[in-house]
Amino acid sequence: MPPPRLLRPGLGVLGRADVGVSSAAGRTPLKNVKKRLDARADAKAWACTVTEALADSINSKNWREALQVFEMLKEQPFYHPKEGTYMKLIVLLGRSGQAAQAHQLFDEMLQQGCQPTPELYTALIGAYCRSGLLDESLQLLTNMKASPLCQPDVYTYSTIIKACVDATRFDLVEAMYKDMAERSISPNTVTQNIVLSGYGKAGLLDDMERVLSDMLDSTTCKPDVWTMNIILSLFGNRGQVEAMEKWYEKFRSYGIEPETRTLNILIGAYGKKRMYDKMSAVMEYMRKLAFPWTTATYNNVIEAFAEVGDAKNMEHTFNQMRSEGMKPDTKTFCCLINGFSKAGFFHKVVGMVKLAERLGVPTDTSFHNAILGACAKADDLMEMERVFMHMKHKQCDPDAMTYSILVEAYRKEGMTDKIYALHQENPTLVPTDLVMV
C-alpha cells in the first residue's frame, strides 16, 4: 500500500488551489482591498484637483469661489487645513473688502485648534484696515498685545499706520509711534515712507520734513528710491520745480539712484510747467541709460501737450507710442480726449472713444468725465446727458468732477431746473449753494 501523499493546505492532488467556498472566501478580501486602494487613489486625485482649484481661485482673486471650494475640502475626512491656507484666504478676503468674512474664518481656525500667529493677526488687521474700520483694527491690536505668543511687530504697526494715514488720522499715527517706542519697535523705511506720503498729500510739510530728517539721520530706516519718488512727486505736483530739482540732487548725493518711475515724475512735472526742453532732456537721458519708455512716460508727454491743446504734437506722441508697441491705458485716452477737445477737434474725440472701445481699454469714471467735458465744451448737452445715462447704466459711479461738469454746462444755458434735479439725485456732490447760484 503506497504511503499517503502529503498535500499542502489548500492545494489539490495536482497542486492547484481547491475550488470551492474557501477559495471564493480567499478572493473576496483581495477585491475589497483593491476597491479601497482605488477609492483612496481617487480621493487623493480629487483632493489634488480641488486643492488646485482653491489655489486658482485665490490667485484669480475670486473670494466667493475660493470659499466654496474651501468648504468642499473641509467636508473630506482626510483634509486638514493648515495655517498657510487660512492666511491666504484671510488676505484674499481682506483685499476684497470682506473683513467680516475674514474674521469669521479666523475664529473658525481657532475652533479647529490652529494656533494664531502674529502674521495671521496682522493679516486680519489688514482686512479691517482696507475697509477703513480703524476701531476694529485697534481692538485686534489690543488683543494681540494681550497674547504672549502674538505680540505685534513693525509690520502690524505699519499696516495700522497706513490706514490711519489714509483716513488722515494723524493723531493716531503719533499714538502708534509712541506705542512702538514703548515696545522698543523701530519703524522701518516702509513705515516712514507711508507717513511721509500722508503728510505730503495732506499739505503738512513741516511734519513731512521732520519725518524726512529723522530718516536721513537714522541708521535703521534710511531713505530709498521710494522716499525719493514721494518727495519729487509732491513738489512736482505742486509746480515747485526748483525744490524738486534740489531734492533730486540731494538724494543722488546720498547714493540713491533714480528708477524709471523717478524719471517719469520729472517728465510729468516739466510737462505741466511747459518746460519742454527739460522734458526732452530727461527722455534722452532715459534712452542713453537704457531706461525703458513706459506707458506712464508717454502719458506724461501726451498730457503736457493736451493741457495746451497742442493736438499735433500730442497725436504725434501717441502714434510713436503705438509704433513702439506700448499699450495705451485709460489715462492715455483721457488725455487725448481732453487735448482734442481743447483744440476743438471734436470729430477726433469721437475717434478716440471708438478706438478705446475697440482696444478694450477700461472705461472708468475719469474716462466718462473726459467725454462729458468734451460734450460740454462742444455745447452738445443732448450727447452729454446720453453719456451720463450710459455711465450710470454701466454702474460707473459719478464723482464730484462729473457733477461739476454737468452743473457748469447747465448753468451756462440757464437750465436751473436741471441743476436742481442733479441736487435731488445727489445732494452730497451737488450742494444747495450750487443750486442757488
Image (cartoon, rainbow, N blue to C red):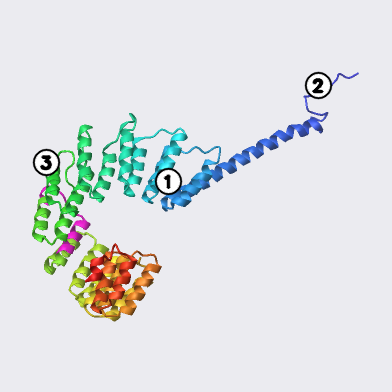
Tag 2 near tag 1, CB within 8 Å? no
Asked if 373 appears above or below 129 in the picture, the reply is below
Q: Earlier in the sequence, mark 1 or mark 3?
A: 1
Q: Residues within 10 Å of mark 1 (few under 14, many from 20)?
A: some
Answer with left or right where residue 28 lies relative to residue 189: right
Q: Which residue is mark 1?
A: 101
Tag nearer the camera, 2 or 3: 3
Kindly identify which numbered label has been placed on residue 31. none
Q: State the separation of the CA atoms marked 2 and 3.
A: 98 Å
Residue 280 image point, x, y percent: 15, 67
Give, as a single range, the part of the protein colored magenta. Answer: 252-269
Asked if 397 appears above or below 339 in the picture, the reply is above
Residue 410 image point, x, y percent: 27, 76
Residue at the spot 39% in from the left edge and 65% down from the top edge? 395
Q: State the separation of the CA atoms marked 1 and 3.
A: 43 Å
Quarter holding residue 12: top right
Q: Which residue is mark 2?
A: 6
Residue 261 image point, x, y percent: 22, 57
Q: Main secondary structure of the magenta part?
A: helix
Q: Secondary structure at mark 2?
A: loop
Q: Which residue is mark 3?
A: 217
Q: State the separation of the CA atoms marked 2 and 1.
A: 74 Å
Residue 315 seen anywhere in this rendered image of the structure? no
Residue 19 image point, x, y percent: 81, 33
Residue at the spot 85% in from the left edge and 20% down from the top edge? 4
Q: Earlier in the sequence, mark 2 or mark 3?
A: 2
Residue type pointed to by label 2 = Leu
Answer with left or right where residue 36 lies relative to residue 138: right
